[in-house]
């Protein structure tokens, strides 16, 4: 592995605690990660909330689309009791069950007073317009995080599977680093070399890395750092070790750090 491979907690320390809750993120920081990964969606009234799925059913006691509800309505739901770590807690710890807004996550990360890299993935569909990217860049500006500098302790990178979303973020905040996430091999990438729209970092899934052994070396030779997701098994860590990737995104950060001897 590279001299210092960055370890990112995917949705927080999400194997141990309910994903995207404040408790899952604080636990990941306690476990010694370099950074955190977070998905964001827009509520009906335009707030950025940390939720992966389009719908509410899997991770809350609500029903329907996240985007159909206001922030106040979503804040009344329970986003933690579905997880085995919370079942039986009486009363449940609000940090494990409450909806997390991106604003609160940014405030908590800044208050942690340590170096943290934050990977923010825009999940709201890019084809529905540029609102999610605009709101995201505006919120990052409010927190003083839209223009990274070497003396900053919190450094944000924006990620998306959508090249359109990456292009919009590049236009709105050219200084922000971006990751283009790759689930399948984009046509022509291996011939062309560079990622489209000026994306800095390549983010292939572990399944794609397994299927295309030439991909990671090719991307790195083209000058792109590579962050691989979502790596939860030691066999996969062994597989990517030979490539020397720059970042590993995992639900089990302590296991990965142990594997790296940190
Ligand atoms: O970190 C990238 C990874 O999170 C992409 O997949 O579905 O977990 O958002 P997903
Ligand atoms: Ca994600």
Image (tube, helix red, strand yellow):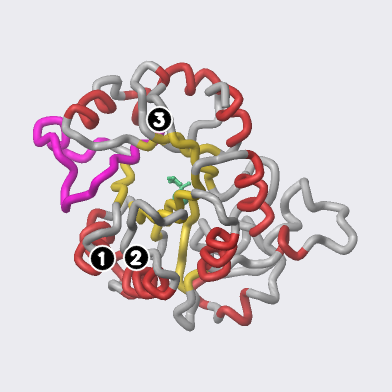
Instruction: Tell me the tag on residue 207.
Output: 3
The answer to whether 75 is drawn above or below residue 175 in the figure is below
The answer to whether 1 is drawn above or below residue 51 in the figure is above
Q: Quadrant of the C terminus?
A: top right
What is the span of residues highlighted in magenta in the rendered image? 185-207
Q: Is residue 202 magenta?
A: yes
Q: Position of residue 235 (x, y in %)?
A: 52, 18
Residue indicated by mark 1: 173
Left or right of 35? Residue 186 is left
Q: Quadrant of the N terminus?
A: top left
Q: CA distance from mark 2 to mark 1?
A: 7 Å
Is residue 65 visible to us here?
no
Q: Position of residue 181 (x, y in %)?
A: 33, 45
Q: CA distance from mark 2 to mark 3?
A: 32 Å
- First-in-chain label (2 vs 1): 2
Is residue 221 visible to us here?
yes
Q: Residue at x 49, y 54 (%)?
A: 38
């Amino acid at each position: 592995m590279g001299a210092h491979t960055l370890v990112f907690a995917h949705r927080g320390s999400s194997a141990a605690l309910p994903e995207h809750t404040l408790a899952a993120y604080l636990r990941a920081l306690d476990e010694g990660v370099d950074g955190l990964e977070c998905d964001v969606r827009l509520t009906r009234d335009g707030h950025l909330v940390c939720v992966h799925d389009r719908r509410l059913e899997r991770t809350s006691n609500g029903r329907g689309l996240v985007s159909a509800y206001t922030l106040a309505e979503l804040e009344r739901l329970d986003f933690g009791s579905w997880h085995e770590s919370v079942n039986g807690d009486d009363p449940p710890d609000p940090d494990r069950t409450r909806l997390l807004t991106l604003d609160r996550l940014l405030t908590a990360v800044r208050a942690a007073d340590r170096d943290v890299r934050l990977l923010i993935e825009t999940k709201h569909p890019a084809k529905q317009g540029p609102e999610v990217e605009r709101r995201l860049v505006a919120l990052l500006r409010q927190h003083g995080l839209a223009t990274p500098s070497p003396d900053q302790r919190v450094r944000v990178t924006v990620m998306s599977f959508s090249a359109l979303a990456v292009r919009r973020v590049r236009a709105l905040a050219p200084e922000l680093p971006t990751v283009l996430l790759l689930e399948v091999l984009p046509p022509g990438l291996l011939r062309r070399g560079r990622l489209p729209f000026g994306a800095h970092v390549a983010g292939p899934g572990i399944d794609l890395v397994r299927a295309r052994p030439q991909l990671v070396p090719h991307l790195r030779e083209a000058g792109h750092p590579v962050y691989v997701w979502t790596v939860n098994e030691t066999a996969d860590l062994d597989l990517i070790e030979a490539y020397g990737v720059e970042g590993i995104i995992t639900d089990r950060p302590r296991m990965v750090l142990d594997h790296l001897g940190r």
